[in-house]
Image: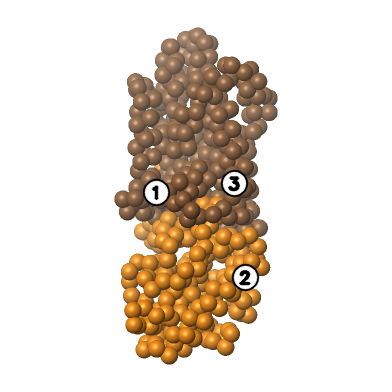
Chain colours: A brown, B orange
Amino acid sequence: MKNKSPKVQLKRLISQLLIFISANLRPLGVKTGFCYPFFYCNACPAATSACPLRSIEQSLYHSSFKWKLFFYPFLILGFFGSTSGRAVCGWACPIGLLQRATSKIVRRLHKKYSFFKKLANHPIEPYMRYMKYIVLITLVMLTPFLIDFMFTDICPVGFLTGTIPTVIIFPGKFVPNVFFTAALIIFILFIILIFTVERGWCRYFCPIGAILAPFNKISYLHVARVPQEIFDKECLHCNACSDICPMGIDVPNMTRSPECILCGKCIEVCPKDLIHFERG
Amino acid sequence: MNKIISITAIIIVSASLVGMWLETEVYQEVKNGIVEVLCLSCLKLDPYTKSEFTFQTANGEKHPDFVLNNLSTGIIFLHFSEDACPGCDIMHPIVEEIFNISFGKEEMVYKEIEYENTTIHYYYTNIDHSTPGRNQWLKIYDKDHVGGLPMFTIITLGYNNGLIQPYYTTLYGTLSLDNDKARSDFLKEVIHEGIELYNENLPGFKG
């Protein structure tokens, strides 16, 4: 079933803003036992829910296995993943919203300095995308289990949404702890990344993206092309879809790519309407 | 075919999730253990430690009965911790060394310890394995409204407008110090101060 909707980007922006607000209702007394289905830190002074990675780490910490805390975030992410794949990354995640805001700067930078464009198109780039699976398995699962070291201790998203707001809201009440310096360095690298590679965090390092990505293969809602014979006949090979894709996907050759965040930019830009959201 | 797979996956995942909500305590566990407790390691910050004593409980509630009962025989040391907490792991052996005791991180512990010729009623609470009533102590003595772990409360006696009353201080995290010796020395210093106050005020305490 085809569903090409106009103003997708405006709807996406409204969705991202509303979800960002609803993720930050603690000042109104809202605290829940849900895990966010996206990347957001429970140490944020306004956070209403738990970071899914924190729940996974807590379940495995110190060679333990608390099955409820382990499976709970996977089921929440699995629900959104099986329904709409990585749409959460494109339509809900506050870190996605941040990277949406930096993407114009990244594009300008790529236009002005070919070095960055070459870097983004380096032959090693596709392999870099496997880094997020390695981060998920090693830093979120193995190191908490084996050596009591957790990804959230050095998480740049925690630094951005937890540490910085806390320091601003409660000046003088907190001092850096043993993880601060390492987290600060990683945070600076994170900032450099999102200003040099469009959706660099989502592409290469996001462990929640790594959980959601395989669901793109079976998700009910996904991005699809018209049937191959029509596509071959109608496609102008203008490459506008690939050029606009924030995840750097080769859209004309894409079949349920695990990298697709269902942002709908390729759908909007296709002059022949050959790409659409599809259900089932 | 893909549609059938998608719908089957949605049904299986949704049913498992609803089953988990209905049949287990996972919602409360996440709320109480992750959302309501400030993860100091996630925050990469420790509360700035001040050892000032106060009479006023953090949430305005009365001191629990066990505090009033125990204060006639010694000071009280409350130690709060949780499972996945690097700061708790740093502080656990320091407390064990100071009081010359040993116990597992997941246990619930009460010990009467002789320290500087005074009895210390030591209560260890791991909030992931504790009861809601005992976890409530954390809110009563969260002096600086941090809500973070590890947390240490020393309850002694103080003079307040003609009355001798429970007088406490709370320390958090790794005590804003960067090595174990400094942490141990600081904790010992605060305990010593609590004992001095206790010995000074005990004769006037009516329980």
Q: Nearer the viewer, mark 3 or mark 2?
A: 2
- The residue furthest front is B161
Q: Chain of mark 1?
A: A
Kindly identify the residue that appears in the image at 38 percent across and 83 percent down: B164
Badge 1 and badge 3 in a common chain: yes
Q: Nearer the viewer, mark 1 or mark 2?
A: 2
- Whether residue B183 is visible, yes or no, is yes
State left or right for residue B119 relative to residue A178: left
Question: Up-down: is A105 above or below A66?
Answer: above
Dot 3: few (<14), some (14–19), or many (≥20) neighbours within 10 Å? many
The residue to which callout 2 is attached is B184
Q: Which mark is residue A183?
A: 3
State left or right for residue A233 relative to residue A196: left
Badge 1 and badge 2 in a common chain: no
Q: Residue A180's spot in the image, x, y percent?
A: 59, 50
The residue to which callout 1 is attached is A46
Closest to the observer: A2 or B66? Answer: B66
> Which amino acid does the dot numbered 3 rest on?
Ala
SS of the residue under disc 1: loop
SS of the residue under disc 2: helix
Q: Chain of mark 2?
A: B
* C-alpha span from label 1 to label 3: 21 Å
Q: Which of the 4 image quadrants contains residue B22?
A: bottom left
Q: Residue A236's spot in the image, x, y percent?
A: 50, 9
Question: Up-down: is A113 above or below A174?
Answer: above
Dot 1: few (<14), some (14–19), or many (≥20) neighbours within 10 Å? many
